[in-house]
Amino acid sequence: MAGRVTLINSSLSSTSIYHMSMYLLPKTIADTLDKQRRTFLWSGNALKKKYHLVRWETICKSKKKGGLGIKNIRKMNVSLLCKWWWKLENEDGLWQSIVKAKYMSNNQLIGSFKHRVDDSPIWSDLLKIRPGYLKGRSTKVRNGRSTLFWEEPWLKSKPLCVLYPVLYDLCTDKGISVHQFILKHAQLHFSRWLPVTLFGPWVSLIDEVYSYPFENEEDKISWKMHKSGGFSTRSVYDLMTSGDTGHPFSHIWKARIPHRIKIFMWLYENKAILTKENLLRRNWQGDPSCYFCPNDENMDHLFFTCPIAKVIWGMIAITLGANNIPENLDQYKIWIEHWLPGGRPVYTFCVAAVCWAIWKRRNAVCFEKKSLRNPVDILLYACALMTYWAGLYGADMQGRIVEGVKVLIACAHKVLAQ
Ligand SMILES: [Zn+2]
């Protein structure tokens, strides 16, 4: 699965980048692309797609928000298209000249175009995503030529049309620029006489405008989503996904373990390991009992409370000098912190090795009909994994892990000898 995540991010998500940076993909196409990626992600799974146990929306969230960081097609599409608006306003070129000649004949501002019947498909796509672009763009007014008087936030933090909705509603000069306002000497047209309650605020607004420090230079357009003020598609994407919520699982992504084990632990945190309990939830027909004992198999049982797991955790507890063992993943986090203080870098490392070892042995029993001779076998397998993975740490930590594992193996052999 980890390999498929990488492949999706490096190829399936980017094959359509060219099209996405030219057109707004129709919803059906975006959905088809999503379906392909989703099917591919779960394809290696022996079980068919009705066993997808994590929602696609969750998978598409960034790792910081609890997902796998697979890009959302629609949001990526919009962020790529926003770049055209930025180019139109800030760069010169053939495309810009054509667009300006065709659509911006009388120095119209980009916030004031209306959709027209003869718009080209690309242009009407751009008009559709314009609101998103305008959200991230800010202008520093100098001569006011490139800034809309009512609809852009320039004098205050919000646009004047939001702060003075009634005045905006009555005004018949809605699309004017700040510069035009000055040229008209503030003589804007309103559809009726302003009563005193509106006239007062209008006059003080005019005063405020006139006390603004205008300069004899073009307005400066900048991109407020990026520190440098320069545009980046990534910042648009980040802005569009900023509303996502979710647990980050940073302990998994930071852990020094192979990527596929990270994905395995991520599935565990999402309660999506395909244990019999989870299969039954998806209408799988079969015997619900554990492969190692007569109880029903679920994640907490398999990895912590099954007699087999208890033997393993018991030996780890002896090695750590603990007098109890954890019964689920949440308890493990508190337990290990208590009995192995200062060992934070290896907390996820240890539990991942044990759970992965149990899972592999369980699958060997399930699919290869192998029988388990002794639970200590699983522990020894977990120790082998830990010794192997220790190579992912620096020399000092590696040495300490190998020492710890040696003690654990000695303990296991003592039990075996009994
Ligand atoms: Zn069991």
Image (cartoon, grey):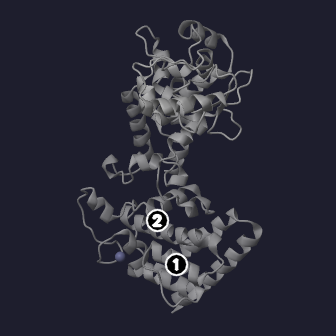
For the view shown, which residue lies furthest in the right direction? Answer: 395
Q: Does residue 220 sit above or below 117 in this rendering?
A: below
Which residue is at the front of the view, 334 or 386?
334
**Residue 151 percent location from the top left of the image:** 51, 28
**Which of the 4 quarters of the picture holds residue 322?**
bottom right
In terms of secondary structure, where does tag 1 sit? helix
Q: Is residue 184 above or below residue 287?
A: above
- Evaluate if marks 1 and 2 touch, with contact meaning CB atoms under 8 Å apart: no
Q: Is residue 36 above or below residue 61?
A: above
What is the residue that sits farthest to the front in this orientation?
Answer: 196
In the picture, measured across the screen, residue 356 lies left or right of residue 89, that is left
Q: Earlier in the sequence, mark 1 or mark 2?
A: 1
179 vs 47, nearest the viewer: 179
List the residue tagged with mark 2: 360
Give the x, y percent position of residue 33.
42, 33
Front in this rendered view, residue 94 or 325: 94
Q: Amino acid at mark 1?
A: Ile
- The location of residue 273, given as percent across then percent down, is 40, 61
State which image quarter holds ligand 1: bottom left
Inspect this view and state whether residue 16 appears: yes
* Circle 1 crowding by C-alpha within 10 Å: few under 14, some 14–19, many from 20: few
Q: CA distance from mark 1 to mark 2?
A: 25 Å
In the picture, measured across the screen, residue 336 lies left or right of residue 270, that is right
Residue 337: horizontal and vertical position, in percent? 57, 79
Please indicate, yes or no, whether residue 44 appears anywhere in the rendered image: no
Dot 2 lies on which element? helix
Circle 1 is placed at which residue position?
Answer: 334
